[in-house]
Image: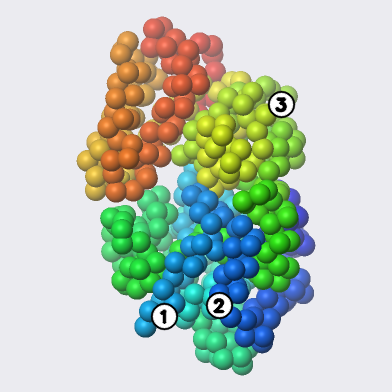
């Protein structure tokens, strides 16, 4: 898997070196110096949160919420336990960046979480790792053991008077556990189903205590911000969204993999880094931010920059940065059928519009894809989607509707042809991507 070694998370990390993840290697790259600095200089909590605000770091898990602002919601004066929780429940189709962070640079995440604990007054943290990420889980446990042994975790860290303990938790592989409140339920040993919000985790989180949840890439960016300053981080991105971003590029490119580039990099440049289109084929469409993000046709994508606002203006979402590239041979009906099946499978079943609606979406798209589509099926998909979006406890229902709406909007002729003739417009090589 290619990793473009520059930027924040993978700066100077030689991922081809089997020891690049170790504590010794991390310290040789300046690791844990940000933590030492804040503990030695007893930097006030507010100053750290302000530095994160200056950096304009936005959550890397999908929502893109400003991290410094989120940290400021934590009620630090609340007596008793408070928690920081990392969401490494990476299960969105197309996303595979967080597993590389815990494989190749786990101490950046550990240091970022300790700093977050200090800034928000939390003495404990958990990293919830997706059940299908086996090697990464083992690697993260090994890194935790190293950090404990060296006095970076536990009581009186580095002899500088701060206590923080961090635990890894291996999930069971349910996509819905990436939703933050379902993750908390699962961490508490219950069925992983989202909670009603409010209350939000900052006031009622893990075990009912104030909790801040961030994505792996978000926490792992924090040591750089404290070490080099929020301004330097901000300068790498665009106004309102600082830093670099890891993009997981999959699909029909020559070199799929993770690429870390400054936010605002043109999509055309990112595609070129990934070796361009496989076999010289033409680009047909791109899902720019994980399977929940609306698909965009080639001409729109080729004019887009890879940052939150540019992608939103183009009609999609940057999400987690999972870029799914589809070439001219992809059948969009079959591709949507596969996506609709995923959301139907992964609905937790609490809300009727989601439990039933995802099933309807899948069955109708499947009907079209198997040559049995009916003339009013596209209207039916619209109507089912309207009865789902915004009417459920969590965003999974919306995530199931976005692909249906965008595929049928941008590639309507393909769907209409399939319904009328019971087969695709041309013999597509790829049933999915
Ligand atoms: Fe569960 Fe779907 Fe409701 Fe989310 S929207 S809580 S996944 S049923």
- The residues tagged by marks 1 and 3 sit, at their Cα atoms, a distance apart of 59 Å
| Residue at disc 1, secondary structure | loop
Q: Is residue 250 left or right of residue 174?
A: right
Most foreground residue, 259 or 423: 259
The tag earlier along the polypeptide, 3 or 2, is 2
Q: Residue at x 44, y 22 (%)?
A: 408
- Percent across and percent down for residue 90 are 49, 53
Asked which quadrant contains residue 180, the reply is bottom left
Q: Which residue corresponds to mark 3?
A: 279
Q: Residue at x 31, y 58 (%)?
A: 198
Label 2, residues with CA under 10 Å away: few <14, some 14-19, many ≥20: some
Q: Is residue 114 visible?
A: no
The tag earlier along the polypeptide, 1 or 3, is 1
Q: Is residue 181 left or right of residue 387?
A: right
Classify the position of the C terminus by image quarter: top right
Q: How many marks?
A: 3
- Percent across and percent down for residue 200 are 35, 61
- The residues tagged by marks 3 and 2 sit, at their Cα atoms, a distance apart of 53 Å
Most foreground residue, 72 or 428: 72
- Percent across and percent down for residue 234 are 69, 57
The tag earlier along the polypeptide, 1 or 2, is 2
Residue 45 - label: 2
Question: Within 8 Å: ligand 1 and the Cβ of disc 3?
Answer: no
Q: Residue at x 59, y 68 (%)?
A: 50
Q: Is residue 122 above or below residue 413?
A: below
Most foreground residue, 46 or 389: 46
Label 1, residues with CA under 10 Å away: few <14, some 14-19, many ≥20: few
Q: Which residue corresponds to mark 1?
A: 77
Residue 134 - label: none
Nearer mark to the viewer, of 3 and 2:
2
């Amino acid at each position: 898997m290619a990793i473009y070694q520059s930027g924040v998370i993978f700066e100077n990390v030689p991922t081809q070196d089997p020891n690049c993840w170790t504590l010794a290697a991390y310290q040789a790259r300046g690791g844990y110096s940000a933590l030492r600095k804040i503990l030695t200089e007893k930097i006030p909590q507010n100053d750290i949160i302000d530095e994160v605000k200056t950096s304009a770091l936005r959550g890397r898990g999908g929502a893109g919420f400003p991290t410094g602002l989120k940290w400021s919601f934590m009620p630090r004066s609340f007596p008793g336990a408070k928690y920081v929780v990392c969401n490494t429940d990476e299960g969105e189709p197309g996303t595979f960046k967080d597993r590389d962070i815990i494989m190749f640079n786990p101490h950046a995440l550990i240091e970022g979480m300790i700093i977050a604990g200090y800034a928000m007054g939390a003495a404990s943290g958990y990293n919830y790792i997706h059940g299908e990420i086996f090697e990464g889980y083992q690697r993260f446990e090994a890194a935790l053991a190293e950090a404990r042994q060296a006095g970076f975790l536990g009581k009186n860290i580095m002899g500088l008077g701060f206590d923080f303990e961090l635990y890894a938790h291996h999930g069971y592989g349910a996509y819905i556990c990436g939703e933050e409140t379902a993750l908390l339920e699962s961490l508490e040993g219950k069925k992983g189903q989202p909670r009603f919000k409010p209350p939000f985790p900052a006031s009622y989180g893990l075990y009912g205590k104030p909790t801040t949840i961030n994505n792996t890439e978000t926490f792992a960016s924090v040591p750089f911000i404290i070490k080099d300053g929020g301004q330097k981080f901000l300068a790498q991105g665009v106004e309102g969204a600082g830093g670099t971003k890891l993009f997981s590029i999959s699909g029909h490119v020559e070199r799929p993999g993770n690429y870390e580039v400054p936010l605002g990099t043109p999509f055309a440049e990112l595609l070129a880094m990934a070796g361009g289109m496989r076999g010289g084929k033409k680009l047909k469409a791109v899902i720019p931010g994980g399977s929940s993000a609306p698909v965009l046709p080639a001409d729109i994508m080729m004019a887009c920059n890879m940052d939150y606002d540019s992608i939103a203006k183009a009609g999609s979402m940057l999400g987690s940065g999972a870029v799914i590239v589809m070439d001219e041979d992809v059948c969009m009906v079959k591709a949507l059928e596969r996506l609709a099946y995923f959301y139907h499978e992964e609905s937790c079943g609490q809300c009727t519009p989601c439990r039933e609606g995802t099933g309807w979406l899948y069955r109708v798209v499947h009907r079209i894809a198997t040559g049995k589509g009916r003339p009013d099926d596209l209207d039916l998909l619209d109507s089912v989607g309207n009865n789902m979006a915004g009417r459920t406890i969590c965003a999974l229902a919306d995530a199931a509707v976005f692909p249906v709406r965008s595929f049928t909007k941008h590639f309507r002729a393909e769907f209409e042809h399939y319904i009328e003739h019971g087969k695709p417009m041309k013999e597509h090589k790829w049933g999915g991507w």
